[in-house]
């Protein structure tokens, strides 16, 4: 193994910093859309297609990249993914036409997809095995914080500078990439560990045939259905209730802040107790604040607390899901991360689209209330997945 020029804790925080950076860049598009829509004379449908392209490439490719990184050492991609994420999104304002615009968004998604499973694989190389839940919590929290801060910081930037000046925001990504080179993180092996068990498969078929892995992936997909629905439609719902766009955005910020903290503490608690119990309890208890808020959506203090708790409880299972899935197939840590942080969100996005269809028929508020049902299915699938003693964190 290559010698690191940093300690284990520093390595974990640097990888979490990369997750912050790529998710930060990945959430620029919603803020840029109104500007791009006018500049490029795009319809609302075209904007929706642009968002869909980014969602597909940034989520569905993650398990594929994870499989490749588990099979081959490709840690140098860490450097390029962080830099190119910034390059592709920050040059959006310089797109000469719509095809280039769509290409840049697709390439941004590819860079983001590459970083997620690779960063998780390298966490296993710098982190203590017994504290993987804690390390993944930091990693997940880094991405959640970057994702939450992006809209606010980009809005502030665009109030002072034109969209053509955005390439200056690539600089933090370049600096972090240089730190990866200096510390040697980019030279760590990404390949999955060798498994002595003769029954442990080493090809893609062994993943598909692993019923427990499939159940966990579906469970987290159903969880993401509820989570993505809230993130996507909360501002719109609150504006229909008479709240200003600023207040509606603030409520979304409350939900995302709760998500960041839930992701931070979920894995730590799983390490100390039991990852299945953390996931199951979080999913079950998340039903209460979600039901409360969508029964009485408002900006009242109680509703705000409910929204914060909903975010925290909905995100708390994610670190434990990565640890648990990774221990079910230790030779495929990258795939496990790609499933739990990528593929499940793709499933959730499809579910959110279904929520939108239902909302067109019966109204957005009751449709969001119905979106709690997948959360119950998620908890049921986690309950039905056996948790063996040897997979404890």
Image (cartoon, grey):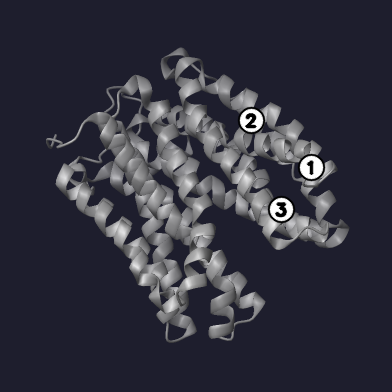
- Residue 256, position in %: x, y? 59, 45
The first of marks 3 and 1 along the sequence is 3
Task: Give the class, few, some or many, for how many residues have Cα within 10 Å of label 2's Cα (few <14, many ≥20).
Answer: many
The CA span between labels 2 and 1 is 34 Å
Left or right: 120 with respect to 283? left
* Mark number, residue 381: 2
- Please name the residue shown 17% across and 49% down the image: 181
Secondary structure, mark 1, is loop
The CA span between labels 3 and 1 is 15 Å
Left or right: 3 with respect to 391? left
Q: Are marks 3 and 1 in contact (CB under 8 Å)?
A: no
User: Can residue 79 be seen at all in this image of the molecule?
Assistant: no
Q: Nearer the viewer, mark 3 or mark 2?
A: 3
Q: Nearer the viewer, residue 120 or 298?
A: 298
- Please name the residue shown 41% across and 15% down the image: 390
Secondary structure, mark 2, is helix
* Mark number, residue 300: 1
The N terminus: image quadrant: top left
User: Can residue 311 be seen at all in this image of the molecule?
Assistant: yes
Task: Give the class, few, some or many, for how many residues have Cα within 10 Å of label 1's Cα (few <14, many ≥20).
Answer: few
> Can you identify the residue that label 3 sits on?
234
The C terminus: image quadrant: top left
Q: Residue furthest left?
A: 3
The first of marks 2 and 1 along the sequence is 1
- Residue 163, position in %: x, y? 46, 76
- Please name the residue shown 36% across and 39% down the image: 120
């Amino acid at each position: 193994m290559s010698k690191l020029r940093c300690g284990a804790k520093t390595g974990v925080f640097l990888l979490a910093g990369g997750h912050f950076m790529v998710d930060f860049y990945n959430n620029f598009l919603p803020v840029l859309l109104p500007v791009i829509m006018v500049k490029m004379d795009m319809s609302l449908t075209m904007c929706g297609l642009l968002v869909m392209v980014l969602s597909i490439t940034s989520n569905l490719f993650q398990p594929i990249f994870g499989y490749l990184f588990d099979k081959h050492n490709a840690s140098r991609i860490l450097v390029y993914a962080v830099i190119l994420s910034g390059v592709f999104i920050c040059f959006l304002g310089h797109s000469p036409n719509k095809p280039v615009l769509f290409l840049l968004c697709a390439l941004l998604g590819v860079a983001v997809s590459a970083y997620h499973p690779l960063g998780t694989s390298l966490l296993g190389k710098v982190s203590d095995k017994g504290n993987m839940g804690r390390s993944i919590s930091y990693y997940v929290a880094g991405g959640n914080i970057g994702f939450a801060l992006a809209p606010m910081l980009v809005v502030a930037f665009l109030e002072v500078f034109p969209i053509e000046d955005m390439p200056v925001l690539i600089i933090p990504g370049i600096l972090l990439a240089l730190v990866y080179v200096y510390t040697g993180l980019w030279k760590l092996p990404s390949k999955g560990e060798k498994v002595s068990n003769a029954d442990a498969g080493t090809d893609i078929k062994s993943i598909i045939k692993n019923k427990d892995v499939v159940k966990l992936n579906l469970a987290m997909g159903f969880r993401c259905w509820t989570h993505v629905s809230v993130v996507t439609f909360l501002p719109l719902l609150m504006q229909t209730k008479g709240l200003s766009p600023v207040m509606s955005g603030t409520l979304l910020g409350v939900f995302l802040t709760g998500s960041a903290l839930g992701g931070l503490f979920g894995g730590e608690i799983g390490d100390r107790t039991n990852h299945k119990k953390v996931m199951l309890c979080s999913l079950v208890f998340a039903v209460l604040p979600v039901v409360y808020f969508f029964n009485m959506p408002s900006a009242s203090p109680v509703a705000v607390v409910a929204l914060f708790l909903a975010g925290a409880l909905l995100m708390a299972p994610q670190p434990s899901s990565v640890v648990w899935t990774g221990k079910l197939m230790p030779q495929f840590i990258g795939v496990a991360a790609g499933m739990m942080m990528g593929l499940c969100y793709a499933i959730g996005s499809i579910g959110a689209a279904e929520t939108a269809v239902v909302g067109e028929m019966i109204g957005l508020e009751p449709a969001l209330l119905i979106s709690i049902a997948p959360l119950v299915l998620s908890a049921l699938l986690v309950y039905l997945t056996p948790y063996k003693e040897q997979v404890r964190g």
